[in-house]
Image: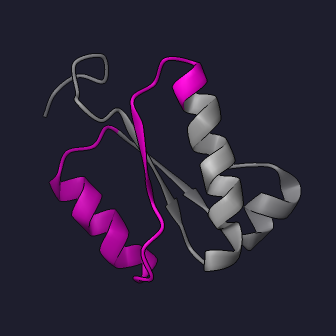
Amino acid sequence: KLPTWLAPVQAVVATIVSDADDYAHDIARQCAAAGIRVETDLRNEKINYKVREHSLAKVPHLLVVGKREAEQGTV
């Protein structure tokens, strides 16, 4: 596992439902503007599968957004 500053992908924004896709793109843009190497995971898979996959890939930070987070503006 690499430290956050050295990891090729520092964070992944994963969605729970497809309603939050636009909000996930906004969060990814904000992270990229802050200098964080970020990717989005908008696939139609269960969140447990996404968390497991990115945990095995040793991504340091996983940002999960759903419909409630999109409405409240949180992560």
Quadrant of the rendered image containing residue 16: bottom right
Q: Is residue 72 left or right of residue 56?
A: right
Q: Report the magenta residues as a range.
A: 32-60
- Depth check: 1 or 66 in front? 66
- Depth check: 39 or 55 in front? 39
Q: Is residue 28 left or right of residue 57?
A: right
**Is residue 59 a member of the stretch shown in magenta?**
yes
Q: In this view, does 70 lie to the left or right of 41?
A: right
Q: Where does the image place residue 53, in percent across and percent down from the top left?
A: 23, 65
Q: Where does the image place residue 60, in percent across and percent down from the top left?
A: 32, 37
Residue sitting at 63 percent across and 65 percent down?
21
Residue sitting at 35 percent across and 32 percent down?
10
- Depth check: 72 or 38 in front? 38
Quadrant of the rendered image containing residue 4: top left
Q: How is colour applied across the structure in the image? A: one colour
How many labels sit on residues?
0
Q: Where does the image place residue 74, in percent across and percent down from the top left?
A: 75, 49
Quadrant of the rendered image containing residue 9: top left
Task: Establish if 13 lies above or below 33.
Answer: below
**Is residue 38 a member of the stretch shown in magenta?**
yes
- Depth check: 36 or 61 in front? 36
Q: Where does the image place residue 48, in percent across and percent down from the top left?
A: 37, 76
Task: Establish if 46 lies above or below 67.
Answer: below
Task: Establish if 39 lies above or below 20.
Answer: above
Residue sitting at 62 percent across and 77 percent down?
18
Residue sitting at 62 percent across and 54 percent down?
24
Quarter of the picture holding the N terminus: top left
Q: Residue furthest right?
A: 72
